[in-house]
Every structure is written in structure tokens, then in C-alpha cells.
Image (cartoon, helix red, strand yellow):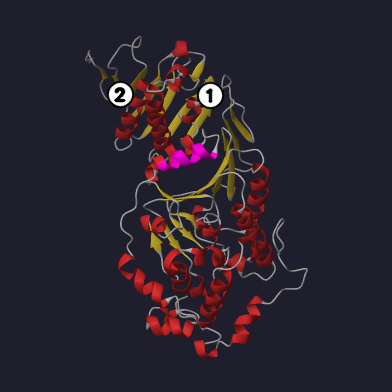
Amino acid sequence: MLKLGINLTRTGSLIVNRAMSSQEADVLFETLNNVGIITLNRPKALNSLNTSMVSKILPQLQEWESNKALVIVKGAGEKAFCAGGDVKVAIDKVEGPRFFRTEYSVNQLIGRYKIPYVAFIDGITMGGGIGMSVHGRYRVATEKTMLKLGINLTRTGSLIVNRAMSSQEADVLFETLNNVGIITLNRPKALNSLNTSMVSKILPQLQEWESNKALVIVKGAGEKAFCAGGDVKVAIDKVEGPRFFRTEYSVNQLIGRYKIPYVAFIDGITMGGGIGMSVHGRYRVATEKTVIAMPETKIGLFPDVGGSYFLPRLPVNLGLYLGLTGDRLKAKDVVKAGIATHFVSSRRLYELEKLLSRCSSEVEVDSLLNKFNEEPDEFSLAPHVQHINYCFAAPSIEEVIERLEKTIHSMCPGSLKITLKALQRGAQLELAQYKDNNPQWNPRTLADVTDEYVESYFKKLPDDKELVFPDSKL
């Protein structure tokens, strides 16, 4: 039982879908039982990728994701899986951008593929070949595989992935793509909340990269959050807490004075310490999934991580509104408020990251981000801006309350007064000068919060406990 033509059928076992013969087709698609098989079919060119190939692979992978048990990708011939992108295509001014856009879309799809993806990296595997394999769930090497494997996975002259532990173990990942440093906060189950281990690794890595990288990108693992703040268990520990905050604030201060471009992809929930990891940097890219908040007054704290520096600098008293109420801003509103600098659809972040990795100057970074930027819609708080500006211009919490009449009564009284004082003072300072639903507040009411209580939070600590930044103005 054979059916010859476009399809060669072996009933119940093999369907080979070849629009052209093996001699002509640059990529072959086959189905064996319920498994999709991709063969990169340019053996004389070491299976290097071109626009034709990736333009066929992308829709085929999209189709198979919903109707196949798994996908296998391999290379034709004895020498290579895939030696990368075709250089002639890559450097072409017209064809190059088209090729890279499609190739990066393929890489991104592989990275989030819902069914098993198995790459047989048998032979030379470089550049685009790594992109076709390393993002998938399974990568099978052989004695002929030519990769430098270990702590560093090398894509010659282009990619060094430095992972001291596997992604299952490491709470923060550091990679180099071309000459760009990439930080991934890697605790997706905890919404990438920060702990002492993470900030203790991030600080020295940022210090090192400042002198030898073109720029730094920071992002969060998973689909839900960039970073939901500091790990509460760590923050309230009497021994670990001070160590964590000292290091975290040093990271915030370094980001605020970083000499090279620092780009934060604030894709998803971004609160507290997550804002500290982003807002002080030169570029903050929001997406449709971004949710921003400084919720400290709801848990008996006040905005730290430089909150008392950036919040009072937001227009029309929005910073005081956000800091005192813990209210949230989403998506394009984050740009309108001045917290983010650009808005990019989350589905384009992978492409943006790869193109940023090719930038060598701040001018190029700025130009690229502007090309990707989508103009924000009307600010959702626009109808209320005048009222917010009036209410939060009041010099005391009591007067703010009088003007608001409601909203703020569920917050911690002490936190409210300390927050207001911190934001009022912070408006005059430099960044380096900062340091359950049924709560039982102490003090219980605003009337119980004395001026002496508030001022006690601004007293100078003993010299051995004061946080001193290098090159600070303290």
C-alpha cells in the first residue's frame, strides 16, 4: 500500500511530506506515527539556515504543536547538525532583517513549545544551530558533536552562557550574548522575589560587567512576574534581613549610577524590590502584562529600594498617591506615569533582546527601543489626575485623609505617616542618600502616631550599621 506523489504513505506508520525532492528541498518535514520530524537539508553548506528554511519551519512547528506527540529536528549528512545562519543572507541589508526576524520567532517558539522538542545535535552546531536546539526541552549530543560544553556553552565569538548551576537550581542566571550581559531572576514559582543569595550574586556581576559590556539586560523567568519584591521571610528575619537589605540597596544604588545602558524588561508583576531592580536604570520596558505597585503600607512598612527618591519625582503627585495607597498601575499606564520608558508587546521581547545584543552604543540602544516602542493610550487615571494632585499635595496625612475621605483608611497608620515624611524628604535628596487582611496595627490610629514616633525612623544609625555607598555624597 503505497501512494506516490507529494505524499509517500506507509499505512499507519510513515508519511513523508516533501514538496520537492531531497536534492532540491532545503528543509524536509516528515511524520512517523504521530511524531513530526524536521531535517535541515543543506549538507554541503553544513545545514546553515536561510530565509527559505526558517520561513517553512515556523508555520510547520506552529501546526504540529497542536496535533503531534513530539517533534524531532536533525541535520542531513555526516558533518553537521547546523553550522548557523547563512552569512550571505545575514549580511544582506534587505534579506538579513527578514531572516533574523523569522529565525528569532522560531527560537522563541521552541523555547515555549508545549510538546516535547528533541534536537539531535550530531556534528557541528553553531550560531543558529544552537538557536534551533538549546531552547528546546531535549538536546541529544553524540561523539561527533562540536560544542564546548560545561559551565560555559560557547557560540564562537557570539554567545557565552555562564550558568554555575542548572536552571532548576540557580535562583539567578547570568549570560553573555555577543557583548551584552543578561540577568534572569529565576524563581518563577515565587514570582522571582529577591533573597540574599540573589542580590549577593547580582551586585558583583553588575560591578564586573560595568567595565567590559556594551549594556545589561535584566528580566524575570516565567510568564507571571518580573519580580514581586523581596522575599518576606528573608526581610523579617532579624539576622538575614539586615544583610539582605544592605546588599539590595547597594544593587539599587549601583543601577542608579550605572555607566552603561541598563535595560529592564518589566514583563508581569513588578513590586517593591522589583521596582528597585528596574526603575533606577536607564531603560524600563513595560508590556501588556506589567502590573506595578508599591504595597508597603499594606504590610506595615514604607517604600524603600529608592522609592522615596523616584516616587516624589513622578508628575502631579502620582508618586505620593501610589506610595500611600499601594494602588496598581498596569500596562501602558506605567509609561504614562513615567515609571517605564517604553512599551513593547511581550511577544516581541525575545526579538528585542536578540537585536539589543547586537548594539554597541547607547545611540543604537536608544534608536532600537524607539523603533519597538508603541505609543501609549490615554492614561486611565486622566479623569482623576486633578483630584489626585490636589489630595496628595496636602502637607500631612490627616489633611490628605480629609481630602480623600476614603480609600486610605485600610492602611497602616504608622506606615502612612512615615511614608509621607520619607517622600517629602526624598524629593530633596539624591538616590544614594536612601536607605493577612486583618492586621493589628501598632500604633492603631493616625491620632496615635506621634511626630516623635515618625522621627525615630529617620535617626542616624550607629556608624557600624549605617549603609555607606562608594562615591556617595553622604
Say if 311 sits above or below 130 in the image.
below
**Residue 356 locus on image (x, y percent):** 49, 37
Nearest the viewer among 309 and 203 is 309
Residue 225 part of the magenta-drawn span? no
Residue 450 vertical placement versus 196 (above, below): below
Q: Amino acid at mark 2?
A: Ser
In the image as oriented, which residue stretches furthest toward the bottom? 447
Evaluate whether residue 438 shows in this view. Answer: yes
Give the amino acid type for the residue marked by disc 1 in the picture: Met
Give the image quarter of residue 235. bottom right
Residue 142, percent across and down? 55, 23
Structural crowding at the residue carrying mark 1, measured as other residues with C-alpha within 10 Å and reported as few (<14), some (14–19) or many (≥20):
many
The location of residue 358, given as percent across then percent down, is 51, 32
- Residue 13 lies in what quarter of the image? top left
Q: Secondary structure at mark 2?
A: loop
Residue at the spot of label 1: 126
- For the C terminus, the quadrant is bottom right
Numbered range of the magenta stretch: 362-370
Q: Which secondary structure lies at badge 1?
A: loop
Return the residue at label 2.
13
Image position, residue 449 (x, y; %): 55, 87
Q: Is residue 96 above or below residue 246?
A: above
Which residue occupies 66% across, 58% down? 250
